Image (cartoon, rainbow, N blue to C red):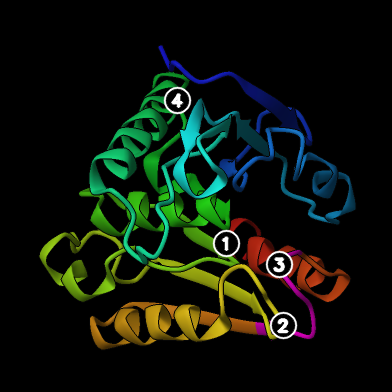
Amino acid sequence: MASLECLINETGADPVGTVIWLHGLGADATDFQPLVDMFEIQAPLRFIFPNAPKRAITINGGMEMRAWYDIREGSPIADQEDIDASKTQIEELIEDELEQGVAHEKITVAGFSQGGVIALESGLVAERKFAGIMALSTYVNNHEELAQRVGLANLDTKIFMAHGLADPMIPITRAITSRQKLLELGYKVEWHEYSMGHQVCPQEIKDLEAWLKSIYED
């Protein structure tokens, strides 16, 4: 049984797939839940929004908040142990879905900012295929050593990456570098950039809707 608290939204009876969507630093499971009602997707889906554990964040003076990993001053690379621990917690959610009869290839891992880092790590190193990987306003942690971590199961999996041109928290250049590394390794990346900061915008929501339809309705 998964150790994370979650909010669950089902858009209809007998969902054909599951989207596990991770929030960013200091947010919680309610952060992206409202987007579900904005999507016009005919295929019934189960959306799972987990709460990250609370932990002390070094860059914020040790203040405790919900976070998937610690952030240290001046260090662009997060602690891999933190990331692996969070990835294990997401794998518990996936196992719960598998036990309920959802096929692994019908599960999408998604995340914003910190949550996107975990979504990318979970999808890229997995030994089983996912339906999709959604990475919003985020990056690949320690991308220079990514080739040593990745599995081959998701080389053909659809990856949605989006970023704000004016993001003050995670510069778009960091996301572009991550995208380039994924392309070099042979992954398929659908890239979007928007005139926004560290957030989501209406056009991005429409693009996400179209991407999810391409996975679960086409």
**Up-down: is 103 above or below 165?**
above
**Up-down: is 93 above or below 22?**
above
Of all residues shown, which one is farthest toward the top?
Answer: 1
Residue type indicated by callout 3: His
Residue assigned mark 3? 198
Of all residues shown, which one is farthest toward the front?
Answer: 61
**Up-down: is 76 above or below 126?**
below
Mark 1 or mark 3, earlier in chain = 3
Which residue corresponds to the image point at 42% horizontal and 49% vertical from the top-left?
A: 118
Residue 197 falls within the magenta-colored stretch? yes
Picture disc at residue 165: none
Q: Quadrant of the N terminus?
A: top left
Pick the front one: 13 or 188: 188
Mark 2: secondary structure: loop
**Residue 3 x/y as whole percent:** 44, 15
Mark 4: secondary structure: loop
**Up-down: is 18 above or below 133?**
above
Residue type indicated by callout 1: Ile
Mark 2 or mark 3, earlier in chain = 2
**Residue 13 x/y as whole percent:** 74, 28
What main secondary structure does the magenta stretch of the protein show? loop
Picture disc at residue 215: 1
Mark 2 or mark 1, earlier in chain = 2
* Bounds of the magenta segment: 193-199
60 lies left or right of 32: left
Residue 185 falls within the magenta-colored stretch? no
Mark 4 or mark 3, earlier in chain = 4
Residue assigned mark 4? 101
128 lies left or right of 48: left
